[in-house]
Image: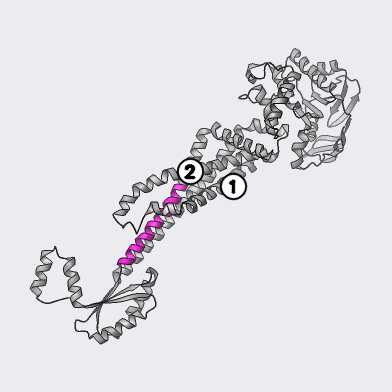
């Protein structure tokens, strides 16, 4: 009897869904927009993480040393820097290596090559290139490097730009997240109102059935359950359709990102595939909870059993 | 047996719909409850089907004290009381069969029971050949018979008819009253709440007259006295 009643609840909820088809369509559409904004937020998070990772790999802190710096002094400085918390490695680039790298980098620029020939000697300084364990360690390491004033062999430091770049990236990431949260919040609020309204109208259009159900002795839960089931249908359909919509969107987005990142750095589809259950399962649970809450709210106000 | 013992029902601010209302209805009785509008007839119906709670007094249905019936028990009460109203309350998009079957479906009856019992009930109300029609394809009297069929589907001990002939012409009204008498002969208590003087006088059954929420007359073979 429980299975039979459950089946009838499902049947009645589907009847409700299709009887107010256009309203159901609008409700599901709003839910899809909410889920899209949430998934977009996730995507933005993945992209910014990949961007930070990529920058992390490219950013290094260079200490340019005096051309005549003694090997012993360089070694002492290197050891001291290696001992700073957060430092992953310190690489010594000799004058010759620096020139080699510079020439390779500008091999197609004739004017640069000519300028080098004109000078007639290696104009570059040896340097120490410092890499940190994590992006978060950079500021601490930079502060420590700034304090290395007793070492006279240090001619100049180059990491101010990195600070600015990292600060900008952090601001952009935080802003993107804030805007994403705000948009998602707006959509979730709209979803609650739309589901509330959909259930309210469903109750109104079923006024006669509800009255008959009450008169002939249907239990309270049997009268209420189809409206809850309808709200669950909205959540289910919303998640199924967002999966159908979001993957093509990722396919469209991926080639543009591929020009900025290499495949190992960022594979959005791969990310969504490997987190499929976690992302869409949680989205279903969230949508289910929101819809059921809105449905209960509408029933509390408009369905007297 | 139904007992209303010193039952009062007050609505704010100071409306006394029923005031020390007393009535006892024995199994198998056919009782007409008459009275002018606003005298408390509908309140009595609402108290009996658990739609309202009494302010004071006691209401018994057999051994069951339903005065302060819990909300979760109301469906079980309503399966014991068939209710018919003046407005037919049939679902226009369902066939007559589906309308009656709906009452069984929502109470969890299996399909085998539904397909066996519904035709029997239609036979009782004389509409077995019209089960596949829609409500708008039959007359008002026939629609009211479908409502009676629906109210009988759970084999209730009581049939409560609140102005069942209000929207019908005299011929259809007589048909409905005949049907109620037929149902009463099977042992079902029939409570007929009505304004219809002709119907009450033709029945020659018990008549309880209500005025200002009180019973002012209770005659075994009564007439419409207002």
Residue with the most extreme front position: B112
Question: Where is mark 2, residue-wise?
Answer: A240
Q: Nearer the viewer, residue A275 or A203?
A: A275
Question: Where is mark 1, residue-wise?
Answer: A293
Q: Quadrant of residue B172?
A: top right
Q: Is residue A209 left or right of residue A104?
A: right
Question: Relative to residue B146, is residue A238 depicted above or below?
Answer: below
The segment highlighted magenta reads A35-58
Query: What residue is rendered at 78% in x and 31% in y?
Result: B81
Q: Is residue B122 left or right of residue B191?
A: left
Query: What residue is rendered at 81% in x and 15% in y?
Result: B198
Q: Nearer the viewer, residue A92 or A292?
A: A92
Residue A223 visible? The answer is no
Q: Secondary structure at mark 1?
A: helix
Is residue A37 found inside the magenta-colored segment of the image? yes
x%, y% of residue A50? Answer: 36, 60
Residue B109 visible? The answer is yes
Is residue B111 found inside the magenta-colored segment of the image? no
Q: Nearer the viewer, residue B202 or B146?
A: B146
x%, y% of residue A294? Answer: 58, 45
Which quadrant does the N terminus of chain A fall into? top right
Query: What residue is rendered at 28% in x and 84% in y?
Result: A75
Q: What is the number of callouts on the image?
A: 2
Question: Relative to residue B217, is residue B107 depicted above or below?
Answer: below
x%, y% of residue A163? Answer: 33, 69
Q: How is the image coloured?
A: one colour
Circle 1 Cα neighbour tier, 10 Å, few/some/many (<14 / 14–19 / ≥20): some
């Amino acid at each position: 009897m429980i299975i039979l009643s459950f089946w009838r609840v499902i049947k009645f909820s589907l009847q409700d869904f299709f009887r107010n088809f256009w309203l159901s369509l609008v409700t599901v559409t709003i839910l899809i927009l909410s889920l899209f904004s949430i998934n977009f937020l996730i995507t933005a998070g993945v992209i910014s993480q990949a961007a930070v990772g990529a920058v992390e790999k490219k950013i290094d802190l260079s200490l340019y040393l005096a051309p005549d710096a003694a090997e012993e002094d360089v070694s002492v400085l290197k050891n001291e820097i290696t001992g700073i918390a957060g430092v992953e490695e310190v690489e010594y680039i000799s004058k010759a290596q620096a020139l080699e790298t510079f020439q390779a980098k500008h091999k197609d620029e004739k004017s640069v090559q000519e300028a080098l020939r004109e000078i007639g000697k290696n104009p570059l300084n040896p340097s120490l290139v410092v890499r940190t364990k994590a992006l978060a360690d950079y500021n601490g390491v930079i502060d420590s490097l700034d304090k290395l004033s007793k070492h006279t062999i240090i001619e100049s430091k180059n990491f101010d730009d990195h600070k600015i770049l990292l600060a900008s990236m952090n601001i952009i990431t935080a802003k993107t997240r804030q805007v994403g949260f705000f948009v998602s919040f707006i959509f979730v609020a709209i979803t609650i109102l739309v589901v509330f309204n959909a259930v309210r109208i469903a109750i109104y259009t079923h006024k006669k059935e509800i009255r008959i159900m009450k008169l002939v002795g249907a239990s309270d839960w049997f009268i209420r359950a189809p409206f809850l089931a309808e709200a669950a249908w909205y959540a289910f359909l919303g998640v199924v359709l967002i999966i159908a919509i979001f993957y093509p969107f990722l396919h469209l987005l991926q080639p543009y990102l591929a020009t900025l990142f290499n495949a190992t750095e960022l594979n959005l589809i791969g990310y969504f595939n490997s987190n499929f259950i976690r992302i869409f399962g949680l989205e279903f649970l969230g949508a289910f909870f929101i819809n059921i809450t809105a449905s209960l709210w509408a029933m509390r106000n408009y369905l007297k059993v | 047996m139904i007992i209303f013992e010193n039952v009062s029902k007050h609505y704010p601010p100071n409306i006394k719909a029923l005031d020390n209302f007393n009535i006892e209805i024995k199994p198998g009785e056919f009782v007409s409850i008459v009275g002018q509008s606003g005298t408390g007839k509908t309140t009595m119906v609402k108290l009996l089907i658990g739609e309202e709670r009494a302010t004071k007094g006691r209401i018994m249905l057999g051994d069951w004290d339903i005065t302060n019936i819990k909300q979760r028990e109301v469906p079980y009460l309503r399966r014991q009381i068939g209710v018919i109203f003046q407005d037919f309350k049939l679902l226009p998009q369902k066939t007559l069969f589906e309308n009656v079957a709906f009452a069984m479906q929502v109470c969890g009856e299996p399909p085998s029971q539904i397909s066996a019992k519904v035709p029997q009930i239609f036979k009782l109300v004389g509409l077995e050949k019209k089960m596949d029609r829609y409500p708008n394809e039959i007359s008002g009297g026939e629609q009211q018979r479908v409502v009676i069929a629906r109210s009988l589907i759970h084999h209730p001990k009581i049939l409560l008819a609140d102005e069942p002939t209000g929207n019908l012409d005299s011929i259809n009204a007589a048909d409905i009253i005949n049907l109620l008498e037929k149902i009463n002969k099977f042992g079902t208590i029939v409570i007929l709440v009505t304004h219809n003087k002709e119907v009450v006088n033709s029945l020659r059954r018990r008549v309880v007259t209500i005025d200002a929420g009180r019973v002012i007359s209770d005659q075994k073979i009564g007439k419409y006295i207002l």
